[in-house]
Amino acid sequence: MKISYNWLKWYIPEAPKAEKLADIVTYHLAEVESMEKKGDDTIFDINILPNRAHDLLSHQGVAREIASLLDIKYIDPTPKYKIPESKSTKLIKTIESPKCRRYMGRVIRNIKIGPSPDWVKNHLESIGQRSINNIVDATNIVMYDCGQPAHVFDLSKVKNLKLTVRNAKKGEKITLLGGVEKTLDETMMVISDDLGNALDIAGIKGGNYAELTKDTKDIILECANFNPVSVRKTAQALNIFTDARKRFENDLSPERAAYGMQELSALIFEMCPEAIFEDVVDVYPEKQKVRKLSFSVDRISSILGLKVSEKEIEEILKRYLLKYELKKGVFEIIVPPMRLDLAIEEDMAEEIGRILGYDKVKGNIPKINFKPKVNETYAKISWARNKLLADGYSEVMTYTFRDKGEVEVMQSASDKKFLRTNLTDGLKESIKLNQLNAPFLGIEKVKVFEIGTAFKKGGEEMHVAFGDKKNVTEVSLNDFCKDMPKDFSLEPRSSNLEAKFKMWSLFPFIARDIAVFVSENVKSAEVSKIIKENMGDMVIKGPELFDEFKKDGKISYAFRLVFQSYERTLTDTEVNEIMNKITDKIKAKGWQVR
């Protein structure tokens, strides 16, 4: 939701600067996803979580929360609302659908449709809303200010001063504001007049039948409360997304409707001082019950894993203006009607922890008083892996999907739509690829293994496959582990090992060999030294002595060098220049290069 910093300061004039406030809100309340400077204002885009959408999708809700968090003054606007003396009314409201929990209506006569005051326009435009006219803008200001959606009907178009909240008829049609027609069914709620004309899809969007025009003189205000599940299902079915829908589908307290009606009436009176207000008609079949919530200090401390004192909890409750009683370490609070998220002890623990700061909760490793049973399959895999590693094999992991097999995967996104029936095929491909990198790896013979699942129509089985380019053997894991000791146990893994890793280059390497004939009294280290002094920094591996032999009183040393760059692909020309330089230096020593 977009929240205006200047709008917030109406209610919390002591609020810190915008940048600091954004950090506080993110840390204690909800993530501030972005900040945008608009003139002398700052607009926060706050990601209000679903569990607080019922009270925080409004400037007043966010301001009240910030005031409690920072323990600063919150200015309640209610006493400032000026509402004229009302007249008796003939408006009749009937609720036929149980999905309407409260419906409030008020007739206002002698209003004048016109442009809104600048402050109203500025407030709406700051959060990305356009100004329409003073009456419609008033309903929008109220929704973004206190969180209560409202709607207005042209009284002259409502027959017999009667409004009914009912379920729609199957196939009933309504043309919405903007001209889009929707077909309804009997699961959807509408507001209709005495002749059955649908004026509004309840809680979602108004129709154009009783739309305001520049000639409208008398209006009906609507502030209501609807079942959140019904609103969401209807909006989803009709593919309608509105800010009113967002608030109702996240559930609102029915008590908020009265507050919205009060604020909306005061705002319209401010903009239309000659207006005549009639009494509010309030149909409230089942009033919201007063809820109490009990929790102990010890339980809160246990849930948070942090020692919290009675005094700390009392300070938090006072800052949030929560009425409470404390008896023998147990608090009992009266839950405010708007706080639908507070229902159980864990909710209060979350609230207290959020305000204190979760950074104060220290991480402790839980004490485990039992020795878990060793997973037999995992133990066999571990034993097989250790044995093969000790025998000089390296572990690889190949693709599970193949281009042929017995078990086909439905809706595969690639040409490899079968699960492998063996590990051998993948292992042979791995050996072939790794053989190309043998010089880079510094090995003469590629020996690899894989432990994985083979899939057949009869089921799946863990296999072990190992070998080199000459031969690959594959057996089941159980057969491979026939010689595993019965008392084999898994060694505990250390949690504080330091990872040693050097990123490899993404560019290809070039391997070159050089053989040198020298006198028998010359050691290989002397030749290696000359090579190192002249090979430069493009050699990432070597010189590595891989062969030597004696002949006619001389000895031959053969070295391998691996060239590679982290920045680009090397060329043969570059490598040849280095090899020529090394050759020249060797010849200068009187040695022979084969």
Image (cartoon, rainbow, N blue to C red):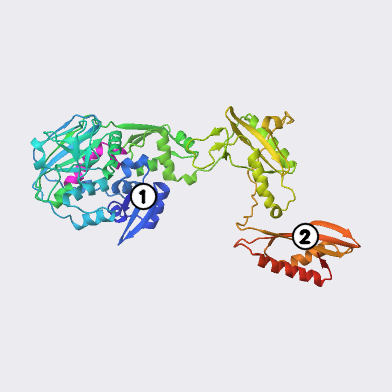
**Position above or below: 121 against 522:** above
* Three-letter amino acid code of the residue under disc 2: Phe
Please identify the quarter of the rendering in which residue 527 is found.
Answer: bottom right
Residue 115 in sight from this viewpoint: yes
In this rendering, would 413 be left or right of 466?
Answer: left
Horizontal and vertical percent position of residue 233: 30, 35
In this rendering, would 33 be left or right of 372?
Answer: left
State the mark number for residue 120: none
Pick the residue in front: 487 or 562: 562
Horizontal and vertical percent position of residue 199: 17, 39
Q: How would you rate the neighbour count of disc 1 (Cα within 10 Å): few for under 14, some for 14-19, many for 20 or more?
A: many
Q: Residue furthest bottom?
A: 588
In this rendering, would 382 be left or right of 99?
Answer: right
Q: Residue furthest top?
A: 458
Pick the residue in front: 590 or 533: 590
> Residue placed at 78% from the left, 71% from the top?
585
- Decide whether the magenta segment is chiefly helix, strand or loop: helix
Tag 1's secondary structure? strand
Please identify the quarter of the rendering in which residue 99 is found.
Answer: top left
Q: Residue furthest front?
A: 404
Q: How would you rate the neighbour count of disc 2 (Cα within 10 Å): few for under 14, some for 14-19, many for 20 or more?
A: many
Q: Is residue 281 magenta?
A: no
* Three-letter amino acid code of the residue under disc 1: Ile
Disc 2 and disc 1: Cα gap in Å?
Answer: 64 Å
- Residue for badge 2: 559
Tell whether label 1 touches label 2 (CB within 8 Å). no
User: What are the residue bounds of the magenta stretch?
Assistant: 246-265
**Position above or below: 538 against 287:** below
Please identify the quarter of the rendering in which residue 19 is found.
Answer: bottom left
Tag 2's secondary structure? strand
> Residue placed at 58% from the left, 27% from the top?
458
- Residue for badge 1: 46
